[in-house]
Image: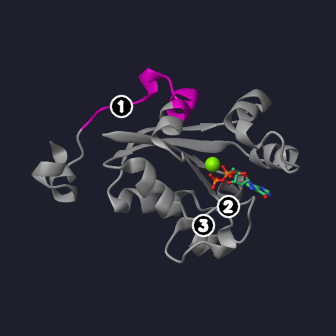
Amino acid sequence: MERTLILIKPDAIGRGLIGKIITRFEEKGLKLAGIKFLKLTDALLSEHYSHLADKPFFGGIKRFMQLTPVIAICLEGLDCVETTRRLCGITKAREAAPGTIRGDWAMSVQANLVHASDSIETANQEVKRFFDDSELFEYEIALTSMIYSEDELR
Ligand code: IDP
Ligand code: MG
């Protein structure tokens, strides 16, 4: 099954939304393959946000992402990358659709609670960037046969 990278950002940590955000993913039926708490270094952020390096807010976003440790999660599921992006909502949180994480709980473009990989290719790179193989787990959750049909599990 597909895997993607989620970061729970400092605004979510500071606002006490860790549990609620993880619950959204769990209740959707996505499975945690890995999870950890870490402080982002300048080098890791420069790599992770390299597509924004020429933007005027690049310094700001790096400072913001270092305000607290963040939680990195590797999620697993069918079409996990696209599904997770939809659950998170668009970048500008105050315009994100109600029912999404950003749409329900955030107002800012920068402080938008979560990062989610934006394509399968990016997801593969980002999961590797944040997790060693030994930190990712294959296991069965009891509800798998209730979440997917037999066809979907094949
Ligand atoms: P995404 O997180 O929705 O994929 P990206 O364009 O990849 O959005 O930007 C990465 C992160 O950079 C955003 O989630 C947000 O925190 C921050 N960011 C993006 N655009 C702006 C901006 O115009 N001002 C301030 N921060 C921004
Ligand atoms: Mg992005």
| Label 1 environment density (alpha carbons within 10 Å; few <14, some 14–19, many ≥20) | few
Q: Residue at x 55, y 75 (%)?
A: 97
- Name the foreground residue: 135 vs 117: 117
Q: Earlier in the sequence, mark 3 or mark 1?
A: 3
Give the residue pinned by disc 2: 112
Q: Are marks 3 and 2 in contact (CB under 8 Å)?
A: yes
Q: Residue at x 54, y 47 (%)?
A: 118
Q: Which mark is residue 74?
A: none
Q: Which mark is residue 137?
A: 1
Q: Which residues are magenta?
A: 125-139
Quadrant position of residue 117: top right
Quadrant into which the C terminus falls: top left
- Residue 35 visible here: no
Give the residue pinned by disc 3: 102
The reply to whether the residue tagged 2 has its Cβ within 8 angstroms of ligand 1 is: yes
The vertical placement of 106 against 45, above or below, is below
What amino acid is found at the position of numbered circle 1 in the picture?
A: Phe
130 in magenta: yes
Helix, strand or loop under label 2? loop
- Name the foreground residue: 95 vs 20: 95
79 in magenta: no
Q: Which percent across, then down, holds residue 100?
A: 51, 69
